[in-house]
Image (cartoon, grey):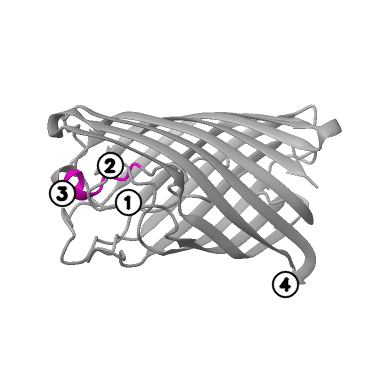
Amino acid sequence: MVRRLVWLFFLCGAVVSAVAGETGHYVNGVEGVRGSALPPPGFYYRMYNQNFQANRLMDGNGDEVNIGFNVDVWATVHRLVLITDHKFLGADYGCDIVFPFIRTDLDVDLLGVHDRDEGLGDINVEPLVLAWHGKQWDAAFGYSIYAPTGGYGANEPASIGKDFWSQMITVGTNVYFDEPREWHASLLARYEIHHEKQDEEITPGNDFHFEWGLGKTVGQIVDVGVAGYCQWQVTDDKGDDATNTEDRDRLFGIGPDVNVFIPPYKMFVGLRYITEFDAIDRPEGDSWTLTLTWIF
């Protein structure tokens, strides 16, 4: 739940005008093979640790722009989750909040750009989380808001803030193929609705994200599998300051995922690697994500 939890390299200012359009908040691929399976009632703390690196910047045709581009993003993201035993529409009601702390290093050699920024990024508040649980399935619904709390400068391309509010609607399901629930698949869809930037006349186009996972539980405490995602910009960027409005972002990613439950510490540890491909109008790279989850 966190887009520019770590994509906060989003090329702004002169760099954007030259090579890319706007991007949204949510970061794909951070939830893994059980992305749609919400926990039972309780209080949870999850920490995402992610490193994203890219030296490829793709244009509106999906071709690499040779400008000496390189971005290195480190993010530590803190998520507090409360799932209650109160029922709404037959589901457990919950809520959560996400605080991303990010460091971005960006270089564009051809343009002489060498920029760095670090600090608190854009906070995500999710006041509505619904979780349903069946014998062979789980389902989830969520509504959240991104607030422009991160620092932003139109001529500071490594800015960790986005400078606009967003709303996000989430729908997902987990399906179990056998009675012991060892083989499972996850589908998670998110739709981002972006609002106008505060300091520029630009309204980024809305984004649709589709994340998936296929895995197997081993020994009741280990999940192994493959996770991936697809993302499409579905409406055009708008506004007097918008550039390349005819280009819409696209991105795909895939990679292995391992999750382990450590009962004595009431703790989950997850590790996944994602490589991206077939990107349009945005950077294309690779990421490592380590997630730590504690049950209270």
Q: Which residues are magenta?
A: 9-17
Marks 2 and 1 close (CB-CB < 8 Å):
yes
Amino acid type of disc 3? Ser
Does residue 40 appear anywhere in the picture? no
Mark 3 / mark 2, whichever is N-terminal = 3
In the image, residue 285 above or below residue 199: above
Please name which of the two marks, 4 or 3, marks the residue nearer to the observer. Answer: 3
Is residue 16 in the magenta section? yes
Q: CA distance from mark 3 to mark 2?
A: 12 Å
State the image coordinates of residue 139 (x, y, percent, origin top left): 65, 56
Please name which of the two marks, 3 or 2, marks the residue nearer to the observer. Answer: 3
Mark number, residue 293: none
Q: CA distance from mark 4 to mark 3?
A: 46 Å
Q: CA distance from mark 1 to mark 3?
A: 13 Å
SS at circle 4: strand
Mark 4 / mark 3, whichever is N-terminal = 3
SS at circle 1: loop
Amino acid type of disc 2? Arg
Few, some or many residues within 10 Å of mark 1 (<14, 14–19, 20+)? many
| Residue corresponding to mark 2 | 282
For residue 27, side relative to residue 176 (left or right): left
Q: CA distance from mark 2 to mark 1?
A: 8 Å
Mark 4 / mark 1, whichever is N-terminal = 1
| Residue corresponding to mark 1 | 23
Please name which of the two marks, 4 or 1, marks the residue nearer to the observer. Answer: 1
SS at circle 3: helix
Image point (44%, 59%), residue name: 191
Mark number, residue 88: 4
Amino acid type of disc 1? Thr
